Image: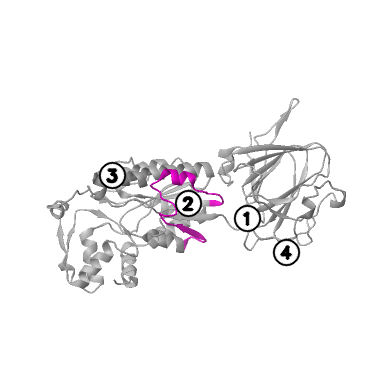
């Protein structure tokens, strides 16, 4: 059996699919929707949830130009029709037109916000629609007049002779159409050091604070209105690694990092949005030289175990990017800013030298997120850190002292055991090696920053307290 082929059009995202038909004396057969083949050819894995079939008995029946709030896969079960599509989305292609004659061998993927209309060319034409949201009488449509002179659709059967509903005759002209706004991108944890950078990096992103959506409350996640949301970026997490070893902290860590993330992954399945979630080097025990994305999870701490549980939940979402990172540095309090502050105040710190890894700057992490979303990279797990030789915390502290004009020998290297001796509270086990392999993200075309280059730039741009 031959495979379908896909043709692009002048309207971004509007794809025409040529379907092979196989027949004999008994009739014919076709694969109307074949997920593996069609997504492999570039169709979105749009997750249809409803299949509808419509029949028109007469030739000339013409449906109004409607831009629905969902993606749509339209094909002909029997007959022949003329299709016309108009881009009604905000942007430079607003008003762009594509027309195509459809029969049993042709299907079209129509992205949300693109107006679509069909005119039957023969009697007894039957349409098939796959959509990725349930039809509702309350759904808001953007509509365009069939006879609009601006788009000038060349209807094979003149509209004066066509069968058109009275409602469709009264739709506005293009000059009076309000363009369809792009689907929303939500950033959870917007107040954190990563969340702030994500909002600045992702076009049109809307940040949500914990007061607006508390990830630790699965019921709040389930009740949240995700209508019109295409991407949810979860930068919220419980990150108090040592406090997570306490009874209260353990509950909080699992609530935010596992239970809440599971609810978010479930919402991604139900509502069909892309889920971006950030993982941690703590999901590994740090006994290997380096880790790749599909290494078995083996956390040694409560925090790491809660993050690992969240990771597993995220993979259930069909459209997900799980970004695993380590040693994150952004604006606000972090290891680098603390070392720079100590250097300037004349404090000589003791820093562990038996934990090895690489820094990750929030600007780089946000850029990698934007890259994956913008390029449509395959969904899955990606390691994202800086490049360069892995270093210990003590070596990084020395470099911070050096770059800020202070004597690096003021940093005293100690072992983790020496550093934690005499601690008054619980101390979580740390991975001895937090080196993540970057091959997979680099193969998508993204080039992470070298950590020493990034460290220099960070210190030069740091706002001193």
Can you identify the residue that label 2 sits on?
232
* Viewer-side label of 1, 4: 4
The residue indicated by pointer 4 is 175
Residue 59: percent from left, percent from top: 83, 42
Query: Tags 2 and 1 in contact by the CB under 8 Å rule?
Result: no
Instruction: State the SS at label 4.
Output: helix
Span shown in magenta: 201-229
Q: Is residue 224 left or right of residue 103?
A: left
Q: What residue is shown with label 3?
A: 250
Q: Which mark is residue 157?
A: none
Q: Is residue 183 above or below residue 311?
A: below
Q: Which mark is residue 12?
A: 1
Q: Secondary structure at mark 2?
A: strand
Mark-to-mark CA distance, 1 and 4: 21 Å
Distance, label 2 to label 1, CA atoms, is: 22 Å
Q: Is residue 284 visible?
A: no
Work out how far the residue at label 3 is from the one at label 1, CA to CA, in angstroms: 47 Å
Observer-nearest of 317 and 45 = 317
Q: Are marks 2 and 4 in contact (CB under 8 Å)?
A: no
User: Foreground: 304 or 412?
Assistant: 304
18 relative position to 292: left or right: right
Eye-nearest disc, 3 or 1: 3
**CB of mark 1 within 8 Å of CB of mark 4?**
no
226 is within the stretch colored magenta: yes
Q: Residue furthest right?
A: 161
Callout in the foreground (3, 4): 3
Q: Give the side of residue 385 with respect to residue 117, left or right.
A: left
């Amino acid at each position: 059996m031959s495979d379908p082929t896909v043709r692009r059009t002048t309207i971004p995202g509007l794809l025409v699919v040529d379907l092979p038909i196989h027949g004999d004396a008994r009739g014919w057969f076709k694969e109307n929707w074949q997920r593996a083949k069609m997504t492999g050819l570039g169709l979105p894995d749009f997750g249809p949830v409803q299949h509808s079939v419509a029949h028109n008995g007469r030739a000339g029946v013409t449906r109004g130009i409607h831009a629905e709030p969902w993606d749509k896969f339209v094909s002909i079960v029997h007959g022949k029709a003329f299709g016309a599509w108009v881009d009604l989305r905000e942007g430079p292609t607003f008003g762009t037109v594509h027309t195509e004659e459809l029969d049993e061998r042709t299907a079209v993927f129509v992205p949300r916000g693109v107006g679509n209309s069909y005119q039957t060319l023969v009697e007894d034409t039957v349409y098939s629609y796959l959509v990725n949201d349930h039809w509702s009488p309350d759904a808001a449509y953007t509509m365009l007049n069939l006879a609009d002179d601006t788009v000038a659709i060349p209807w094979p059967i003149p509209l004066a002779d066509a069968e058109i509903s009275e409602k469709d005759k009264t739709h506005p002209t293009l000059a009076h159409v309000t363009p369809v706004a792009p689907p929303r991108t939500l950033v959870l944890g917007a107040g954190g050091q990563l969340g702030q950078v994500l909002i600045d990096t992702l076009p049109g992103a809307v940040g949500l604070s914990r007061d607006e959506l508390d990830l630790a409350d699965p019921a709040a996640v389930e009740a949240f209105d995700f209508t019109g949301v295409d991407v949810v970026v979860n930068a919220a997490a419980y990150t108090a690694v040592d406090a997570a070893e306490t009874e209260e902290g353990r509950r909080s860590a699992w609530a935010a990092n596992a239970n809440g993330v599971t609810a978010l992954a479930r919402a991604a399945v139900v509502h069909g949005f892309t889920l971006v979630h950030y993982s941690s080097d703590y999901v590994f025990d740090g006994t290997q030289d380096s880790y790749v994305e599909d290494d078995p999870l083996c956390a040694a701490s409560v925090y790491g175990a809660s993050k690992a549980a969240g990771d597993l939940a995220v993979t259930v979402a069909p459209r997900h990017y799980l970004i695993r990172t380590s040693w994150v540095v952004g604006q606000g309090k972090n290891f680098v800013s603390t070392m720079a502050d100590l250097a300037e105040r004349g404090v000589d710190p003791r820093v562990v030298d038996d934990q090895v890894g690489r820094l990750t700057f929030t600007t780089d992490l946000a850029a990698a997120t934007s890259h994956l979303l913008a390029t449509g990279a395959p969904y899955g797990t990606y390691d994202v850190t800086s490049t360069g030789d892995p270093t210990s915390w003590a070596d990084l502290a020395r470099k911070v002292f050096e770059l800020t004009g202070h004597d690096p020998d003021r940093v005293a290297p100690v072992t983790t055991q020496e550093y934690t001796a005499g601690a008054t509270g619980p101390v979580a086990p740390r991975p001895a090696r937090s080196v993540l392999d970057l091959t997979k993200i680099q193969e998508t075309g993204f080039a992470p920053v070298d950590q020493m280059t990034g460290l220099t730039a960070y210190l030069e741009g740091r706002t001193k307290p």
